[in-house]
Amino acid sequence: MSQKKILVIGMLDSIHLARWLEQFTEEDISFILFPSKRFRRPHLKLQALLSKEFTAKFSLALAPEIIRFSGYFDFLANEIFKRFTPADSRTRKLSKVLSNNQFNYVHGIEIQGAGYLLSEQDPKNLESNKVILTNWGSDIYYFMSIEDHLIKIKNALRIADYYSAECVRDYSLAREYGFKGIDLPCIPNAGGFELQKQTEGSIPPSARSQILIKGYGGKFGRADIPVSVIPTIFQSHPKYTYFIYSVTPDTMALIQGLPKEVRQRIRVSEVGNGLSQIEMMHEFRKSRIYIGCSISDGISTSFLEAVVNGSYPIQSGTSCANEWVQKGAHATIVNLNPEELLAAIEQALVDDQLVDNAAKQNLILAERELSSEVIKKQALTFYTA
């Protein structure tokens, strides 16, 4: 049997894309990667896939300068020189790749980038390829309320033969907005977890003294809510420290405005200079609770990372974390309300049995639903239909 050839269109600087592809290193598949959006450099995990030897083959659809110059070629071409470059240059490049090659599958990962690019293609370039469209986070759930985006979302869904998402919620939305193909498994977009590594050296949550907070602000994040309640928590529970990660500039300004004695208990990792996945897993294993608040989200990968690492998850109901609570996850789902969030944090800080029992039950769920072996088995079905 000849090697399968798959064009993957996605954000080359995304760890989630790299982790998705890592699942297929031992498969007889040739992956050709096309950047869906501007980027400075491919993610380090993706660079490893491109440079090392595996059964699977990973290569770039565009010129190798993207790797040789650490992606700055693409960044410069699209940022500094964009005034001299037609706006549809990426669309035309994709058209050339599609017209000059035959693929078993064309997989668009993330709708606002890859999905929109595919919807702009001449149908003739896609008619001989099976098209997979993968929904990330709030690709439909948030953007369906914006008229211009909804038109593009519908166009992307109409050309897809297969659709995948990490929320049951999004399969219904895809059907509502024109998808008529085959549903693929509902699994985390970034693959599963090596659970043995997550539990090695872990201490019970009740013995941990760190609170972990996702620091996104901007368009989707509401880190302003947990940051606003830190002084109140500090007054009642002064022993706790805080690690706030993926901090955006607006969140940083709020942190800097906190009282000095509170700031001294906070460590920060900014969004442009994030920790590695291994380092982040270590932070989860040190944390009694994890807090994530957003205007809109999918599962929230951080929610799952809290589940597998024994950190008690407190997540806003704007995600689909409630679907995992229905599966058996122990967590608290809150509205975007400071008083409600504060009450949930207070309960998780005073109730040792709550957080320790949650960690035990969440590990059972993780072994059943989130291990690398379980997720990989389902992921392999994407390219066998």
Image: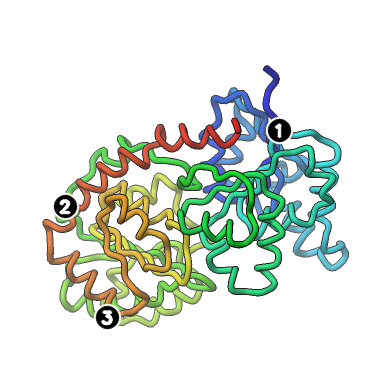
User: Given the current orientation, which residue lies at the most extreme top position?
Assistant: 1
Q: Quadrant of residue 126?
A: top right
Q: Secondary structure at mark 3?
A: helix
* Residue located 57% across and 63% down the image: 140
Say which quadrant the C terminus sits in. top right
When the figure is inspected, residue 375 is found, relative to residue 360, above or below; the finding is above
Say which quadrant the N terminus sits in. top right
Nearest to the observer: residue 243 or residue 3: 3
Counting from the top left corner in percent of width and height, residue 306 is at 32, 53
Query: Mark 2 sits on what residue?
Result: 356
When the figure is inspected, residue 207 is found, relative to residue 19, above or below; the finding is below
> Which of disc 2 and disc 3 is earlier in sequence?
3
Q: Residues within 10 Å of mark 2 (few under 14, many from 20)?
A: many
Q: Nearer the viewer, mark 1 or mark 2?
A: 1
Nearest to the observer: residue 321 or residue 282: 321
Counting from the top left corner in percent of width and height, residue 262 is at 28, 76
Q: Nearer the viewer, mark 1 or mark 3?
A: 1
Numbered tag placed on residue 131 in the rendering: none
Give yes or no for contact between labels 1 and 2 (Cβ–Cβ under 8 Å).
Answer: no
Residue type at mark 3? Glu
* Residue located 23% across and 70% down the image: 344
* Residue located 37% across and 37% down the image: 371
Counting from the top left corner in percent of width and height, residue 91 is at 80, 54
Query: Mark 3 sits on what residue?
Result: 339
Query: Mark 1 sits on what residue?
Result: 104
| Residue 344 horizontal side relative to residue 14, left or right | left
Nearest to the observer: residue 312 or residue 66: 312
> Which of disc 2 and disc 1 is earlier in sequence?
1
Q: Estimate the spatial distance between the alpha carbons at disc 3 and disc 2, rounded to whole Å.
A: 24 Å
Q: Secondary structure at mark 2?
A: helix
Q: Residues within 10 Å of mark 1 (few under 14, many from 20)?
A: some
